Image (spheres, helix red, strand yellow):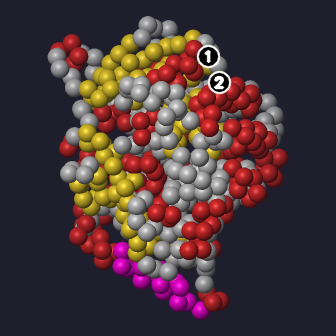
Amino acid sequence: MEDNRGLIVLLFCLPASFLFDLVLQLRNWFNRTFLSAPQRHDTRVRQIQSQVRHCNDLPEAEKKLMCTSRPNWLSLSITFFRKDLCHKIPIPLYDILELKEEVMTVRVEPMVTVGDITRYLIPKGYTLAVTLEIADATLGGLAFGVGMTTYSHKVGLYQETIVAYEVVLGDGSLVRVTKDNEYSDLFYCLPWSHGTLGFLVALELQIIPVKPYVKMEYIPINGQKEYCDKIRELSGAMDKDKQTPDFVEATIFSKHEAVLMVGHFANVKNAQEEAQVNHVARWYKPWFYKHVESFLNKPPSQEFIPLREYLLRHNRAIFWVVESMIPFGNNPLFRLLFGWLLPPKPAFLKFTTTPGIRAMTFTKQVFQDIVLPINVLEKQIDVAEEIFDAYPILVYPCRIYDHGPHTGQLRPPRSDQMCPGTNWGMFNDLGVYGVPGPVKRKERFDAVGAMRKMEKFTCDVGGYPFLYADIFMDRKEFEEMFDLAAYEKARAKYHANDAFPHLYDKVKPEIDVFQVGKEYMDPL
């Protein structure tokens, strides 16, 4: 089965995923066509409040913590939180509520997806300041989790672009939370809280004006120090007055080879530029990272990509995860005949997860996005290679702001990480996805030991892993990495202690990763 994984995925998984997605799309179409009613938003929120109050009024013996009723398989998290142990509250909020062009914001309900909002905003000449590359990600999930993109060197994490949260608290009250009102302490704790402080019922997000295309320049660089220095230079990591491009990212193909990508919003003005337009999202086109790899042995080159296709450029191959599932998936004939079936839907993959598959999601593969200070970028790559030996590696520069001590789960950047004359330090997302080298070579691989080494390095340099993926820290180690002082106060003040799970309990793996890691250490 291992040797014929690609054929199994092609013959069974992809068609089933396509049908599964078709059913979901029909359901979403029905909801939006017949149940969509932005004008009924307040009524639906009152129903959520009523259900929360009902849970609070239950006899003591019947009381349980609360969570949303959204199935685990619909989330992009790798873990499966035990929702069966909680009172499950439906949050049927899927509408875009209001575009406020005069203040450059959009107000949405939490279940609006990246795909929904890009279809809505881009024809109007806007996009979110931070737009994740995966179409199925929900704006509410990103708000209570974390998001980062290739525009983040200008604005920071997704949470920095949120103007207001509307939240139903554990006592059933509805509050509008901003950084300047009486709930400012809660404002800084909601990101990275993963639904453990309240139910999100709406949020207001910053938007930016855009042009129809992104003019992309591909810059191949040999030498680790050379490409690391260039990333820092292009992102303005140590120069607050640097005129930076609209988009900056790098794909590192080996320790000594990388392609940097620099993008600017653009119009296509003439026939010569029209000839340079590349529709990278079409089903028959090479996967984006393979397209990028083709520039390794070319001089710097440029092209124009339609904006929405650029924003979702990694969607078809889920960055490069699909290659481990379908090794021949980037073959031109496969793309032409079957490329329209990609990507396999994350919801389908989670829906069909068996205990054995769940075990292999971390013992035979790696899915990690880690926020790390860019001044140790060389060390990041060395450590990732030593531990995982998995390429390509993704790098997005991103500002991390200093909002003061104990103002959220992220600690302020250290003094040597700050950009001089600013209140931010330049960090980066280190994205490591796919099959580790030892697993490919059918060698023994201690996945738990590897991840604990990565977590220790992350904590030592003042970084943070995205919490959608498995973590291997105990509670004490988790609280050393994340600053939970303000979070714990917010839980007590805003009625969360007896209403919602604790953050650590919400994001820790639902299985015994240490035991499973031992069982799956040897090659299959």
- The vertical placement of 218 against 196, above or below, is above
- The vertical placement of 179 against 399, above or below, is below
Pick the quarter of the image with the C terminus: top right
Q: Which residues are magenta?
A: 45-59
| Residue carrying label 2 | 378
Q: Quadrant for residue 338, please give it.
A: top left
- Residue 357 coordinates in the image, percent (x, y): 66, 48
Q: Nearer the viewer, residue 267 or 319?
A: 267
How many neighbours does mark 2 have within 10 angstroms: few (below 14), some (14-19), or many (20 or more)? some
Total residue callouts: 2
Q: Quadrant for residue 87, please give it.
A: bottom right
The reply, left or right, for residue 33 in relation to residue 343 is left
| Residue carrying label 1 | 225
Residue 290 shows in the view: no
Helix, strand or loop at label 1? It is helix
The reply, left or right, for residue 102 in relation to residue 93 is left
Amino acid on which disc 1 is placed? Lys
Residue beneath the point at 42% across and 17% down: 218
